[in-house]
Image: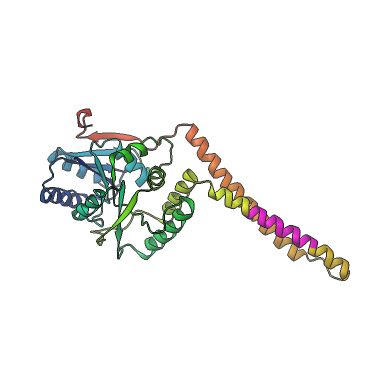
Amino acid sequence: MKLSFVIPCYRSSNTIGFVVDEIKEKMKSMSISDYEIVLVNDCSPDNTFEVIRQICAENPNVIGIDHTKNFGQHAALMAGFHYVSGDIVICLDDDGQTPANEVDRLLSKLDEGYDVVYAKYDKKKHSAFRNMGTIFNKKLTEVMLEKPKELHITSYFVMRRFIMDEIIRYKNAYPYVIGLILRATKNICNVTVTHRDRIEGKSGYSFRKLISLWVNGFTAFSVIPLRMATFSGAVFAFAGFVFAIYTVINKLINPEVPMGWSSTFSALLVIGGLLLLVLGMIGEYVGRIYISLNSSPQYVIRSVVNYTEEKK
């Protein structure tokens, strides 16, 4: 059984070497020699790919991939998936927070018959902002993607080859690995592992990037936002109809009641805002359909190091 590690890299010139060394030590302690590590440089502004080149020169079982621009973590994972040859695929971070030396705990759970095993952390070492984002994402995935409430989704997980093969069948421009996994199987579980402090630096996920990721995932794999917009429109339309009847009856009963411009203006603002929100949501879906029809790429690779077709 061959293991394939896929690691998206961004601003990790000082950390990726530690992660690779930790994987090597763990594989040695587990007496596993048949493994590979795929490092995907997502157009990092530092010298991350130069470090990856050096790692590849020293380790023939490490493959380096360099993107032409920053396509995001999920696109980097998709790129890495196309270059793996293992029976089991393991995804983790480049900053040392996800403990590669505990991968045996995930693999042992996989042996129980699960298709995918996600790491779960008792105490996360992320910032308060990232933790709030995680909670928000958890709730949204439960509603939009029908994720089981007891399942925790993280960037550290292992999956069987046939799940990865199903994932890479997705060719549209906006990949969302979480949605693709949940679409492929529900035979998923969690294993608790340690979550460590970052070796250095801070998360590459800004508020804008998190919002973009969420919008990407939920518009690509769910029509629930459109259904919510339809339901909201129906509720506001019904409320407006009831208010109109109330206004007419109140005027008939008490002719001296003044017709208020403020209430009318407030109602127009609410209804107008709702209409713009719904139109924007529809536009987001239509725009993504248009981009997908234009065959916009998930990622573009500048160069690949240490890879030959014989490794497939």
Q: Residue at x 46, y 46 (%)?
A: 216
Q: Looking at the image, can residue 67 be seen?
A: no
Q: Is residue 240 above or below residue 222?
A: below
Q: In the shown orientation, is residue 183 left or right of residue 203?
A: right
Q: Find residue 152 and report its horizontal and vertical position in percent.
A: 36, 57
Region in magenta: 232-245
- Quarter of the image for residue 6 reads top left
Q: Main secondary structure of the magenta part?
A: helix
Q: Looking at the image, can residue 224 be seen?
A: yes
- Quarter of the image for residue 180 reads top left
220 inside magenta stretch: no
Q: Find residue 232 and report its horizontal and vertical position in percent.
A: 62, 55
**Which of these two is toward me, 30 or 261?**
30
Q: In the shown orientation, is residue 219 left or right of residue 73?
A: right
Quadrant containing the N terminus in the rendered view: top left
Q: Find residue 141 and report its horizontal and vertical position in percent.
A: 44, 53
**Which of these two is toward me, 152 or 52?**
152
Query: Tag count in the figure?
Result: 0
Quadrant containing the C terminus in the rendered view: top left
Q: Is residue 60 above or below residue 131?
A: above
Q: Is residue 85 above or below residue 92?
A: above
Q: Residue at x 19, y 34 (%)?
A: 306
